[in-house]
Amino acid sequence: MLFLGLVYAQVEGIGMYPTLASTIACIIALCYNYLMHYHWTFASDAPHGKVFIRYCIMCAGAVVLNGLIMHFGLILTSIHFMFLQLLAGGAMTLWSLGMSFFWVFQGN
């Protein structure tokens, strides 16, 4: 919800281009999510330094995935930007949860 609200507010509120708004919102939401996932979702006991580096790598992949879906969706289709964002959000969720579960928050 935070993510979609930020995208909508930036595009409709201040007229920002949807891909840029989506990228900025993605970065803000991913920073917030790190703390929530570390302590609550995965209850990790791995050191923050190692986990945070892995998390940043995973986030970079999520930002690129989001940007690609938004960019090509906007130039190749006539789909509304918020619907594209929902699709990109689903793809990022699958990517992030899979990477988090199998790699990011593991103690190895």
Image: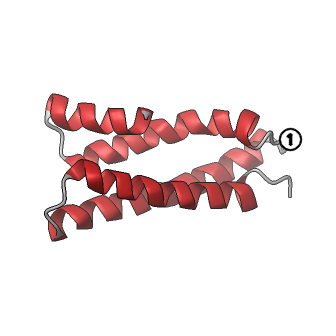
Q: Residue at x 72, y 40 (%)?
A: 41
Q: Residue at x 55, y 60 (%)?
A: 94
Q: Name the residue under label 1.
A: 45
Residue 4 drawn above or below residue 64: above
Relative placement, left or right, of 68 versus 58 is left
Q: Which residue is drawn at 35% across and 47% down?
A: 23
Relative placement, left or right, of 97 versus 20 is right
Quarter of the N terminus within the rendering:
top left
Q: Where is residue 63 in the image (x, y as percent from the top left)?
A: 44, 54
Relative placement, left or right, of 78 versus 26 is left
Quarter of the C terminus within the rendering:
bottom right
In the figure, residue 98 lies in which quadrant?
bottom right
Relative placement, left or right, of 76 versus 6 is left
Residue found farthest to the bottom? 76
Q: What residue type is labelled 1?
A: Asp
Q: Where is residue 43 in the image (x, y as percent from the top left)?
A: 80, 39
- Mark 1, other Cα within 10 Å: few <14 / some 14–19 / many ≥20: few
